[in-house]
Structure formats: C-alpha cells, structure tokens
Image (cartoon, rainbow, N blue to C red):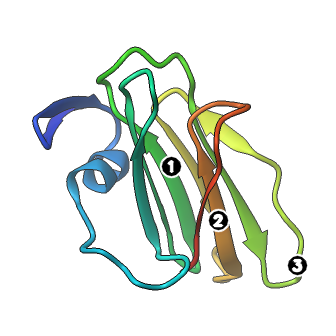
C-alpha cells in the first residue's frame, strides 16, 4: 500500500502507515508509547507499543537498506528475540504482557525504547 505521510511516500501496511503519519505531541515521560526518528541515510522510522502489540515501521523515503526491528520485554522480565521486516516488524501478546519495547532501524543501529 502506498500512503502519503508528512509528504513521504510510504510503502507498507496500514499499521506502519498510521505510525509514520501520526505525530504524538511532545510526551514528557521518560518513555512514551511512540517514537519517531530519521537515520542519517534519510529514512524515517517509527515505533509504537501497547500492552498487547509492539510495532516498528520503516518509510520508503531516504536511502537506508536497514529493516525495521522490534523487541519487547514481558511482565516476567524476559526479553523477546528481535523481530525484523523490510517495512514493518510486529510482536503481539494476546495476554497483554508487554511492559516495554525497543525499536531500531538496522541490526547495529541506535535503540529507541517505548512503554505502554
């Protein structure tokens, strides 16, 4: 699906398109439930988390070859394995056990944390 997000053409799923189109007004908490960043190669990424789902999305702008990456921390203190995808990475917890998520734009990139 092609979507315009802040003037960017995004080729991705509806979830990621929504992530990249929505801009949360400056949250003051140490970790908000949403993060958006741009890598030095010009590609926009965004991440969001709820107690049941964590998503990292990658826009179709810029020149970054990196994928969208996401990992989650569960109520029991364990972290999931990393999940990645060309335009979107999603981890779901039907029981609502997610307490934190980590998002990045490539295997060795800077990490961004969110909390539900």
When the figure is inspected, residue 24 is found, relative to residue 64, above or below; the finding is below
**Quadrant of res 93:** bottom right
Q: Residue at x 43, y 21 (%)?
A: 41
In whole angstroms, how far apart are the C-alphas of marks 2 and 3?
A: 12 Å
Q: How many marks?
A: 3
Position in image of residue 63 (x %, y %): 40, 14
24 left or right of 107 in image: left
- Image quadrant in which the N terminus is located: top left
| Cβ atoms at labels 3 and 1 below 8 Å apart | no
Check residue 56 in the rendering and tell me which mark sits there, or answer none.
1
Position in image of residue 74 (x %, y %): 78, 76
Q: Which residue is mark 3?
A: 77
Q: Residue at x 57, y 24 (%)?
A: 66
Give the secondary structure at mark 3: loop
Position in image of residue 92 (x %, y %): 62, 64
Q: Which residue is mark 2?
A: 101
- Image quadrant in which the C terminus is located: bottom right
In whole angstroms, how far apart are the C-alphas of marks 3 and 1?
A: 21 Å
């Amino acid at each position: 699906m092609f979507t315009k997000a802040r003037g960017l053409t995004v080729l991705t799923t509806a979830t990621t398109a929504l992530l990249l189109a929505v801009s949360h007004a400056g949250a003051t908490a140490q970790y908000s439930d949403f993060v958006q960043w741009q890598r030095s190669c010009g590609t926009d990424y965004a991440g969001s988390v709820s107690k049941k789902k964590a998503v990292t999305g990658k826009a179709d702008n810029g020149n970054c070859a990196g994928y969208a990456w996401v990992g989650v921390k569960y109520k029991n203190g364990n972290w999931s394995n990393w999940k990645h995808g060309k335009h979107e990475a999603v981890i779901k917890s039907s029981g609502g056990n997610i307490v934190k998520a980590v998002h990045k734009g490539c295997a060795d990139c800077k990490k961004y944390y969110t909390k539900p």
